[in-house]
Image (cartoon, rainbow, N blue to C red):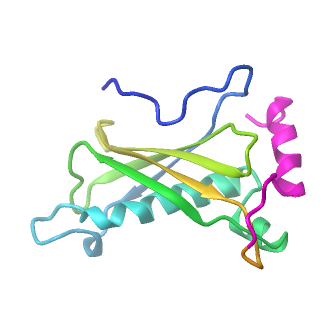
């Protein structure tokens, strides 16, 4: 499947960070036709963001401990083929490089056969706990960016 990238590559930037997790479609996630209800995909994206955050020490807890929130500004979902109850799936989550005060996540969901079922992205902005938009990444995230750019993170 050929498609236009959600986030164009930034020249001289590090490659996206990635994590893939496995899970199974639960009964509560399907509609009467045994197909995953379209409204469940944002929570699959959330599963992926949490897995990537834990892997690279930029979890929601890290944001909270640094008094920074990262609300979703944009979400996009492309449905390619359905997932069904009991089917295994993988959620690949990629964090794309940006020096802006934001998080650019891409998601690729595959069924047990490895076929792409869904793709999408989210964009999250950094805000203080006082709901003030941050123009620059917070210090803890800036240190993370330095590690990423220097090749420490793979």
Q: Position of residue 154 (x, y in %)?
A: 73, 34
Q: Residue furthest bottom?
A: 130
Please determine whether, in this image, residue 96 is positioned above or below residue 84: above
Q: Position of residue 42 (x, y in %)?
A: 42, 62
Q: Position of residue 143 (x, y in %)?
A: 89, 47
The front one of 79 and 115 is 79
The front one of 90 and 2 is 2
The N terminus lies in quadrant = top left
Q: Position of residue 3 (x, y in %)?
A: 36, 27
Please determine whether, in this image, residue 25 is positioned above or below residue 78: below
Whether residue 47 is visible here, answered yes or no, is no
Residue found 9% across the figure and 65% down from its top: 33
Span colored in magenta: 132-154
Displayed quadrant of residue 110: top left
The front one of 64 and 54 is 64
Is 134 colored magenta in this rendering?
Answer: yes
Residue found 55% across the figure and 28% down from its top: 8
Residue found 81% across the figure and 42% down from its top: 145
Is 142 colored magenta in this rendering?
Answer: yes
In the figure, is residue 120 to the left or right of 73?
Answer: left
In the figure, is residue 85 to the left or right of 149?
Answer: left
Please determine whether, in this image, residue 83 is positioned above or below residue 20: below
């Amino acid at each position: 499947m050929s498609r236009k990238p959600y986030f164009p590559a930034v020249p001289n930037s590090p490659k996206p960070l990635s994590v893939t997790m496995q899970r199974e479609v639960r009964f509560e996630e399907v509609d009467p036709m045994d197909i995953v209800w379209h409204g469940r995909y944002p929570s699959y994206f959330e599963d992926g963001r949490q897995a990537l955050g834990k892997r690279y020490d930029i979890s929601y807890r890290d944001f909270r401990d640094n008094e920074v929130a990262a609300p979703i500004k944009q979400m996009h979902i492309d449905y390619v083929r359905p997932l069904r109850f009991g089917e295994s799936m993988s959620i690949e989550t990629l964090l794309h490089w940006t020096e802006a005060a934001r998080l650019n996540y891409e998601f690729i969901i595959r069924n047990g056969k490895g076929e792409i079922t869904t793709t999408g992205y989210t964009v999250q902005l950094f805000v203080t706990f006082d709901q003030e938009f941050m123009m620059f990444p917070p210090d803890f995230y800036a240190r993370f960016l330095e590690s990423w750019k220097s090749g420490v993170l793979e």
